[in-house]
Image (cartoon, helix red, strand yellow):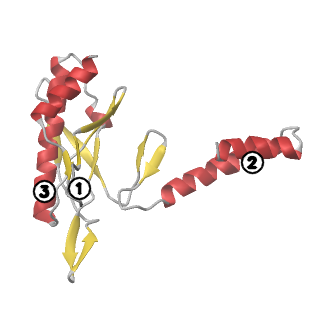
């Protein structure tokens, strides 16, 4: 209940992601994705370039600070040491839009006592490990593929040491890989 109220209040104070529809209908508008105590705050900008990326990150900093302030009002603690930020920004190189992998931004947030914490910026090529998936904003799925292959190898080694028939082993592995 309290989370719903905080999310509603945050939506009144901060405009996050706004992706217009390409066919003129209602697009996507949202501020946060939340699950229990894990919240992702969103921001978007339809232009490209480093100036626009800096502007977007400044707006995101404001939005995240407002979220933290709302949590303080509700007596919820904010674990800034767990915070990270990521940006999928584009720059114009030789008349083509390319992902800006060299973008840097110093994001700092203040806790209820005014102490400043530096928030880590993760590159667009690096995955954000969240809710069981490791996806990189630039679309690179190699991280997730490597992670899953490691898990599959571990499962196969564990299966070899059990006394299962070939059919039982097939069912066990198949149910884990393709539920």
Q: Is residue 46 above or below residue 72?
A: below
Determine the residue positioned at 15% across, 67% down.
49
Estimate the spatial distance between the alpha carbons at disc 2 and disc 1, rounded to whole Å: 45 Å
Please tell me whether mark 1 sits on a helix, a strand or a loop: loop
Residue depth check, mark 2 versus mark 1: number of the one nearer the observer: 1
Q: Is residue 61 left or right of residue 36?
A: left
Q: Read off the residue under disc 3.
A: 54
Towards the viewer: 91 or 154 = 91
Assess whether mark 2 and mark 3 are in contact (beta carbons under 8 angstroms). Answer: no
Towards the viewer: 25 or 130 = 25
Please tell me whether mark 2 sits on a helix, a strand or a loop: helix
Whether residue 111 is visible here, answered yes or no, is no
- Crowdedness near tag 1: few (<14), some (14–19) or many (≥20) residues, C-alpha within 10 Å: few
Estimate the spatial distance between the alpha carbons at disc 1 and disc 3, rounded to whole Å: 25 Å
- Crowdedness near tag 2: few (<14), some (14–19) or many (≥20) residues, C-alpha within 10 Å: some
Determine the residue positioned at 16% across, 56% down.
45
Q: Earlier in the sequence, mark 2 or mark 1?
A: 1
Q: Earlier in the sequence, mark 3 or mark 2?
A: 3
Q: Kindly identify which numbered label has been placed on residue 156.
A: 2
Q: Quadrant location of residue 39? A: top left
Q: Read off the residue under disc 1.
A: 21
Q: Quadrant location of residue 41? A: top left
Determine the residue positioned at 51% across, 53% down.
144
Q: Is residue 92 above or below residue 117?
A: below
Q: Earlier in the sequence, mark 1 or mark 3?
A: 1
Q: Is residue 113 left or right of residue 144?
A: left
Q: In which quadrant will I find the C terminus? A: top right
Q: Residue 52: image x %, image y %?
A: 12, 60
Estimate the spatial distance between the alpha carbons at disc 3 and disc 2, rounded to whole Å: 47 Å
- Number of dots carrying numbers: 3
Q: Is residue 93 above or below residue 149?
A: below
Please tell me whether mark 3 sits on a helix, a strand or a loop: helix
């Amino acid at each position: 209940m309290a989370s719903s109220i905080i999310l509603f209040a945050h939506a009144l104070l901060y405009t996050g992601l706004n992706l217009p529809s390409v066919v003129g209908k209602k697009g996507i508008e949202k501020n946060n994705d939340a699950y229990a105590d894990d919240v992702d705050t969103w921001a978007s900008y339809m232009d490209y370039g480093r100036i626009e990326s800096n502007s977007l990150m400044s707006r995101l900093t404001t939005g995240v600070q407002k979220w933290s302030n709302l949590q303080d009002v509700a007596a919820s603690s904010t674990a800034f040491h767990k915070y990270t930020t990521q940006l999928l920004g584009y720059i114009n190189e030789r008349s083509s839009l390319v992902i800006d992998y060299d973008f840097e931004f110093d994001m700092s947030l203040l806790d209820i006592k005014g102490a400043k914490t530096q928030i880590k910026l993760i590159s667009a090529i690096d995955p954000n490990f969240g809710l069981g998936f490791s996806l990189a904003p630039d679309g690179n799925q190699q991280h997730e593929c490597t992670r899953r292959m490691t898990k599959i190898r571990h499962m196969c080694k564990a299966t070899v040491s059990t006394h299962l028939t070939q059919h039982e082993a097939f069912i066990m592995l198949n149910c884990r890989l393709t539920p």
